Amino acid sequence: MEHTEAKQAMKELTMMLIYLSRFCEREKFAEAKHFYAWKGYDFDVLNGLDDEDLIRQGSRRSKSVYLTETGKEYAQSLLEKYGIDDWK
């Protein structure tokens, strides 16, 4: 297995946790297209993910983040990379 630098690991792990802990507001989960997650993660990592348009924080005072389509695809590729199953 290849080694990952700590900074990259923080980014990848945070993105996977955001994705796996996602929720939707008014839609059934299986049919939802718009997902959010609580933002209890390192602010520097969140800011970096926002800068890369993987998430949107909206107001910095907001307690949740929005997963962009690019962010969902990136998180799904990370789950595949690490052999983690998505929710069914």
Image (spheres, rainbow, N blue to C red):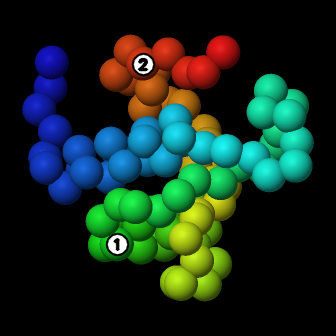
* Quadrant into which the C terminus falls: top right
Could you tell which of marks 2 and 1 lies nearer the N-terminus?
1
Left-right relation of 33 to 80: right
* Numbered marks: total: 2
Secondary structure of the residue carrying tag 1 is helix
Examine the rendered structure and indicate whether residue 83 appears above or below residue 31.
above
Q: Which residue is mark 2?
A: 84
Kind of residue sitting beneath label 2: Ile
The x, y position of residue 79, in whole percent, is 45, 26
Left-right relation of 35 to 20: right
The x, y position of residue 65, in whole percent, is 58, 63
Tag on residue 43?
A: 1
The answer to whether residue 74 is seen in the rendering is no
Q: CA distance from mark 2 to mark 1?
A: 25 Å
Left-right relation of 37 to 68: left
Left-right relation of 40 to 38: left
The answer to whether residue 86 is seen in the rendering is yes
68 or 27, nearer to the observer: 27
The x, y position of residue 64, in whole percent, is 58, 65
The x, y position of residue 5, in whole percent, is 13, 46
User: For mark 2, does the 10 Å Cα neighbourhood hold few (<14), some (14 to 19), or many (20 or more) residues?
Assistant: few
Examine the rendered structure and indicate whether residue 10 appears above or below residue 13.
below
Kind of residue sitting beneath label 1: Phe
25 or 52, nearer to the observer: 25
